[in-house]
Image (cartoon, rainbow, N blue to C red):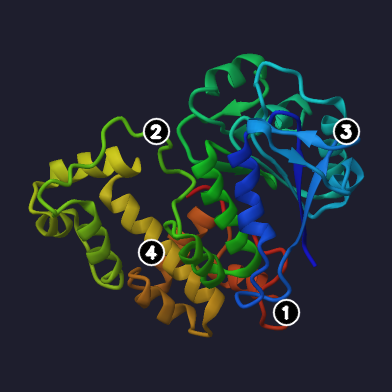
Amino acid sequence: MHVVAVAVTAGMPIFELAVPCEVFGTVRRDLVDPWYEFRLCTVEPGPTRVARGFQVETPYRAADLVAADTVIVPACANVHDAPPPALLDAVRAARARGARIAAICSGTFVLAAAGLLDGRRATTHWMHAAELARRYPEVTVDPGVLYAEDGGIFTSAGTAAGLDLYLELMRRDHGTAVANALARRIVIPPHRDGGQAQYVEMPVPAANGDGLAKVLDWALARLDQPLTIADLAGIAHVSPRTLARRFRGALGVSPLQWVLSQRIRRAQHLLEATDEPVERIATLAGFGGPANLRRHFTQAVGVSPAAYRRTFRGANGTPSPHPVSPARH
């Protein structure tokens, strides 16, 4: 059983602590069985008081954090305070064991202080990105994305981006269908690419009821068909230039970049959940032919469609507990 352990530190925000409890700690065997084994781990003896007067009492300590398969480091109380030495030692030891490490929001500062991000790309909440880059010049800070991965170490922006990252981890562990079902349970969008912008200066205009939602739904229903920006703009009843501006403002990508990312996701789901041949998947996902699918899929995910299917589904045809790690889209 895959063990997910969350590092609990004094004063940490309660929401950042509660979210992984809801995602991984609520057992949902109707979605997948076995579910995760979930542990809250404190790094100091005795109960730990977190924000807003809440207190965490748990039998799990730093050694349990080290032994976990996935280690989650939520936001810390203050990015200017030095992380507890016991926590730094624990995440280093967990990483040395081969654990998957995920930091949420200012939790990225903990991984940076532990030296785990040296020479790696990482992100954090946009308000703290400049400070992270100043204090840890060895880290390549990407302040604009929702979440990032580099070598099995994941970092994310604020709490909502942490939810996106948790769904991505769920998808890698159990497939798109399980991740989407969980998203429906907790009533959040099923997926936002890690490369999406984390901060939007202006919301999408929606006064006329013909905003992006209608365009996105229309395009998703027709991913197997040729789609142009003129087609999308026509559905939105705006010019292609206006539509491109709305996409950039809301999603951080161009309309055709978004379409491509959704086609990649469609192909991943079909590779994970069906036995359709690659040639058929190329058609269903809108790539036209297998050569086009292989080119775009390999560039986005880092492996070919055939290799992705073999690794994800495992030798016995079922999802592998350690599928390939797609590159940033």
Residue at numbered disc 4: 263
Q: Is residue 214 left or right of residue 88?
A: left
For residue 159, the mark is none
In x, y percent, where is residue 186?
50, 60
The amino acid on which the numbered mark 2 sits, given as a three-letter code, is Tyr
Q: Nearer the viewer, residue 300 or 113?
A: 113
Residue at numbered disc 1: 315
Above-or-below relation of 194 to 308: above
Q: Residue furthest front?
A: 53
Q: Nearer the viewer, residue 73 or 281?
A: 73
In x, y percent, where is residue 204?
23, 42
- Inter-mark Cα distance, 3 to 4: 47 Å
Residue at numbered disc 3: 44
- Inter-mark Cα distance, 1 to 4: 26 Å
> In the rendered structure, are the residues bearing label 3 and label 4 in contact, judged by CB atoms less than 8 Å apart?
no
Q: Residues within 10 Å of mark 4 (few under 14, many from 20)?
A: many
Mark 3 vs mark 4: give the one in front.
Answer: 3
Image quadrant assignment for residue 215:
bottom left
Residue at numbered disc 2: 199
The amino acid on which the numbered mark 4 sits, given as a three-letter code, is Arg
Seen at 22% across and 66% down, the residue is: 218
> In the rendered structure, are the residues bearing label 1 and label 4 in contact, judged by CB atoms less than 8 Å apart?
no
Mark 4, secondary structure of its residue: helix
Q: Earlier in the sequence, mark 1 or mark 4?
A: 4
Mark 3 vs mark 2: give the one in front.
Answer: 3
Q: Earlier in the sequence, mark 3 or mark 4?
A: 3
The amino acid on which the numbered mark 1 sits, given as a three-letter code, is Ala
Mark 2, secondary structure of its residue: loop
Seen at 58% across and 17% down, the residue is: 131
Mark 1 vs mark 3: give the one in front.
Answer: 3
Q: Earlier in the sequence, mark 1 or mark 3?
A: 3
